Image (tube, rainbow, N blue to C red):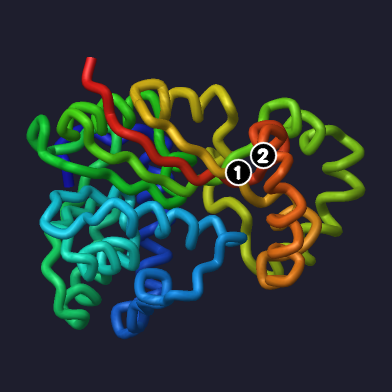
Amino acid sequence: MNSMALTARQQRELDYHREHAAAAARQAFRPVGDDVIVSRQRRPWNAYWSMYDRLLACDLAGREVLVLGCGFGDDAIRIARLGARVSACDLSPESLAIAELRAQREGVEIVFAAMPAEALAYADNSFDAVVFVDILHHVDIKATMAEVARVLKPGARVIGDELYTHSRLQRVRDSAPVQRLVYPRMRGWIYGAQTPYITEDEHKIDEHEFSLVTERLTDLETDWFNILEGRLYPSRMIRAARIERAVMRPLARLGRLLAGRVVFSGRLAKS
């Protein structure tokens, strides 16, 4: 673990992930599927698959790639299978222990390290690319992006898939009628027994926070997802997701206002 003292938020995250890793020890024996990197039948209605479409287009073989907030290592392992030289970090040593065992079982070499995203131990200009998957709503975005910009090489690829909500729409969701009458009913339908957020600090990033992620990027491309998915129907309803994507594609400009998830890519411009 980086020697930097943890903030109260980081400590809450760490405490949760310690418990989660202990409860999920069997994850070390679960194979990491490769459909998302090998299947010729792509899923453009799915944000995660769309992020991998961007990764596959980059040709990361032989490149130094950082996976930030790697958890149990699924994405780090998949990206290593693409031939990248992967470094992966996480706040939780317990999660990393599971990730390391999985990487060994999968026969890929990955350099794992425990550290906060806000205080990376890597040298300046170390990486050709960084990948974010549902990590930015766990961290101090401004501090994290400053560190990311430091450890990336000029022109490095930045690719992510993150939870998102526009502040105007969030105000509607936070209104008393929605919180009292609508959300409690929809939560069970959408999430089942799962908890939407694991700590009190979490929230979907808004347009202002997203601008902190992208302000140093050139050639920025964004795709907006989950306008209704995850809000009015669960992700397991694939046909509904396909219809939603087809209907909303011509209305892409509304995505920034209505979406619940954003997939993005760009290149880092060093100041």
Task: Tell me the residue at 71%/56% (across/down).
Answer: 246
Pinpoint residue 16: horizontal percent, then vertical percent. Answer: 43, 55
Residue 50: % across, % down: 49, 57
Circle nearer the viewer, 1 or 2:
2
Residue most extreme to the top = 271
Report the residue marked by disc 1.
Answer: 224
- Residue 157 marker: none
Name which residue lies at 24% across and 76% down. Answer: 102
The residue shown at (42%, 51%) is 133
Residue under circle 2? Answer: 252
The amino acid type found where label 1 is placed reads Trp
Q: Can you tell which quarter of the image residue 229 is in?
A: bottom right
Asked if labels 2 and 1 touch by Cβ distance under 8 angstroms, the answer is: yes
| Mark 1 closeness class: few <14, some 14–19, many ≥20 residues within 10 Å | many
157 up-or-down from 30: above or below: above
Examine the rendered structure and indicate whether residue 132 appears above or below residue 6.
below
| Few, some or many residues within 10 Å of mark 2 (<14, 14–19, 20+) | some
Query: Residue at horizontal 39%, vertical 52%?
Result: 54
Percent coordinates x, y for residue 208 in the rendering = 55, 22
Question: Is residue 254 found left or right of 123 in the rendered image?
Answer: right
In the displayed structure, does residue 11 sit left or right of residue 128? Answer: right
Q: Secondary structure at mark 2?
A: helix
Mark 2 residue type:
Ala
Q: Nearer the viewer, residue 191 or 44?
A: 44
- In the foreground, 9 or 120: 120
Residue 169 falls in image quadrant: top right
Q: Is residue 64 above or below residue 118?
A: below
How far from the left and from the top, in percent, is residue 123?
8, 34
Q: Is residue 182 above or below residue 253?
A: below
* Quarter of image, res 268: top left
Compare marks 1 and 2 and give the one earlier in the sequence.
Answer: 1
Is residue 49 or residue 106 the one in the foreground? 49
